[in-house]
Image: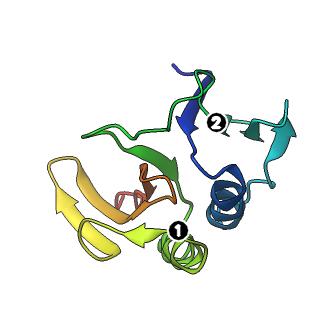
Amino acid sequence: MFSHLMVGANDLEASRKFYDAVLGTLGIAPGVINNGTRYFYRSAKGTFSITQPIDGQPATYANGGTVGFLAESPEQVQAFHAAGMANGGTTCEDPPGPREGPFGALHLAYLRDPSGNKICALHRPAKPA
């Protein structure tokens, strides 16, 4: 459905350090600089990018918006959260861990990046056969 997702960053290098760390826990290579104003993180499943706003105004985050990243295990979710906290992120929502909802069991961790964007790592356990 999506080709890429891009969020604004007020301090590009602080955001790069944060995303290199959290996305690295999911097996995604460090960001590649483009034009000196944005970093791209590419995988076989899509592209994520951080950028300084092209209009020169401060980056703002979406009220109610969340960017979710797939994790392969609950351990990856925990590592994602720990890496974010160690690299300028702040925790938000409930503590990392399992949740039960209308779509079944999930393992989630929420963070705000250095510019305030809300992100999440999500692992959906396999349903018992």
User: Looking at the image, which is closer to me, 79 or 65?
Assistant: 65
The answer to whether residue 87 is seen in the rendering is yes
Left or right side of 128 for 55: right
**Residue nearer the viewer, 59 or 126:** 59
| Amino acid type, label 2 | Gln
Q: Quadrant of residue 84?
A: bottom right
In the displayed structure, would residue 124 be above or below residue 10?
A: below
Q: Is residue 36 left or right of residue 90?
A: right
Q: Earlier in the sequence, mark 1 or mark 2?
A: 2
Question: Residue 115: x percent and y percent?
Answer: 49, 52
Outermost residue, front direction?
56
Nearest the camera: 111 or 12? 12
Which residue is the site of mark 2? 52
Q: Position of residue 103 (x, y in %)?
A: 22, 47
In the image, which disc is placed on residue 73? 1
Give the residue type at disc 1. Ser
- Which residue sits at x=74%, y=54%? 28
Instruction: Name the residue at 29% across, 77% down.
Output: 95
Q: Calculate the distance from the C-alpha at mark 1 to the C-alpha at mark 2.
A: 32 Å
Question: In the rendered image, which quarter is residue 65 located in?
Answer: top left
Q: Is residue 43 visible?
A: no
Q: Sort mark 2 into few (<14), some (14-19) or many (20+) by Cα contacts within 10 Å.
A: some
SS class, disc 1: loop
User: Relative to 2, does residue 88 appear above or below in the rendering?
Assistant: below
Instruction: Look at 51% across and 77% down and name the residue there.
Output: 85
**Dot 2 lies on which element?**
loop
Q: Is residue 128 left or right of residue 21?
A: left
Q: At which x and y percent is residue 120?
A: 42, 56
> Mark 1 or mark 2: which is in front?
2
Q: Is residue 19 above or below residue 86?
A: above
